[in-house]
Amino acid sequence: MQFVPPDYFRKLSREEMFPDPSRPLEIDLGCGDGSFLVALAEAYPQRDFLGVERLLGRVRKVCRKAERAELTNLRVLRLETAYTVGWLLPDACATRVHFLFPDPWPKKKHHKRRLVTDDFCAAIERILVAGGEFLFKTDHREYFDEALPVLEAAAGLQRLDWAPDAFFYPTTDFEALWRAEGREVYSARFSRSS
């Protein structure tokens, strides 16, 4: 279940990630322990799913969960998100990219580590197919307020409505935790224009 690229210093081809490039590919950036990703892969066996996670312990957890569920449509890449999106993933490879509850780096001196930047948005546009979607959730209002104008300014992304019942979307462990604590969750959904 762990995906190790043949070369970390060139763009991958779609076929290197999953053998059938005609199947839709969804990417979960910072997939954590994989609960959300496994639930999606179980619900949509006709799609492929790639989790990106830099922490080895979490990658191993996702792999164990996927193996127990006997999933053949899920792989996990152990790598840093910005590099993966900016340099490794092929152009127009993903139908959906999920970016859920990223570290908000709340201290002012750490804001430069936040991922939603102009370069990140350009990379998301590059890896999404025409009509593909970028889905973002956070419980951190300040981060959401900072990220939203950056996403809305991206020339190739258009904001879409995201009703709670629009489609099956599992609750992440972080979302369940924050909601249990009474915290609000902020979400935004974007589509890549043709």
Image (spheres, helix red, strand yellow):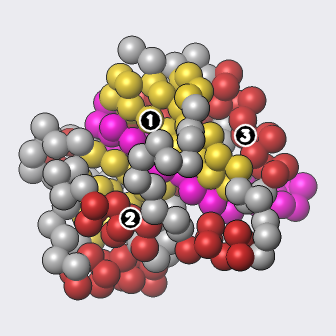
Relative vertical location of residue 76 with respect to residue 15 in this rendering, above or below: below
Q: Amino acid at mark 2?
A: Leu
Looking at the rendering, the stretch of residues picked out in magenta corresponds to 86-113
Relative vertical location of residue 186 with respect to residue 13 in this rendering, above or below: below
Q: Which residue is mark 2?
A: 37
Query: Can residue 111 be seen here?
Result: no
Residue 117 position, x and y percent, is 67, 37
Q: Is residue 96 magenta-colored?
A: yes
Nearer the observer: mark 1 or 3; the answer is: 1
Which badge, 1 or 3, is on the more N-terminal residue?
A: 1
**Residue 11 or residue 170, whichever sits in front:** 170
Which badge, 3 or 2, is on the more N-terminal residue?
A: 2
The circle on residue 133 is: 1
| Residue occupying image coordinates x 39% and y 42% | 96
| Residue occupying image coordinates x 23% and y 42% | 24
Q: Which residue is mark 3?
A: 147
Look at the numbered disc 2 and give the secondary structure of its residue: helix
The alpha-carbon separation of the residues under discs 1 and 3 comes to: 16 Å
Q: Amino acid at mark 3?
A: Ala
